[in-house]
Image (cartoon, grey):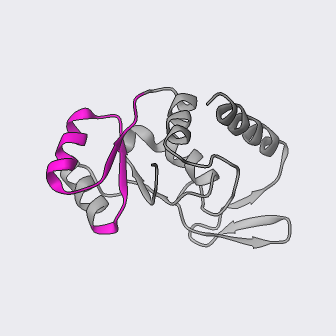
Amino acid sequence: MAKGPFLADLMLMKLGRWLRLAGEDVANPEGCIEDADLIVKARVEGRVLLTRDKALLARCKKGGADCLLILSSDLDDQLAQMVDLGLDLRLDPQRCTLCNAPLEKGGDRWICTGCGKAYWQGSHWVGIDERMARIRDRI
């Protein structure tokens, strides 16, 4: 079962942004240069570390942190793996795609409470929603 909150390693930042579009809490690896730092951050913050690095997966297990090995380098396959593990992949703007801070609804927009980025339902919204539906449907 894919149950967050999550921490994406540097290889999976794009996956992290897409998971945030689905309302998931996915922290960035800020300040975590070494694998050991990622493991500590995941453990201290109670996050599941998302990685493609098999050696990091093994170190997570030894370090007492939850970790999920993402098998593909393809974003759609990565998202499909998360759906396979129980994630409800639906467009649900609750977190900033850049900094992961909560979004605040105001009229027809959402504003990030952390960095101030604005989000709205523009033409890109339909494409994002359709891509998520295609991934859900292929499972």
Residue located at (27% from left, 68% from top): 44
Q: How far across and how far down the image is residue 46, in percent?
A: 34, 65
Q: Over which residues does the magenta segment extend?
A: 44-71
- Would you place residue 123 above or below residue 32 in this image? above
- Asked whether 53 falls inside the magenta stretch, the response is yes
Compared to residue 103, the image places residue 119 above or below, namely above
Q: Is residue 6 magenta?
A: no
- Position of the C terminus, as image quadrant, is top right
* In-image side of 117 versus 78 (left or right): right
Image location (x, y in percent) of residue 93: 68, 59
Residue 3, image x, y percentages: 46, 55
> As displayed, is residue 101 above or below residue 9?
below
Q: Is residue 7 left or right of residue 137?
A: left
User: In front here: 88 or 97?
Assistant: 88
Q: Along the horizontal axis of the image, is 64 left or right of 29?
A: left
Rendered residue at 60%/62% (across/down)? 95
Q: Nearer the viewer, residue 38 or 98?
A: 38
Place residue 75 in its image quadrant. Answer: top right
Residues 100 and 31: in front is 100
Q: Position of residue 123 (x, y in %)?
A: 84, 42
Most distant residue in the left direction: 62
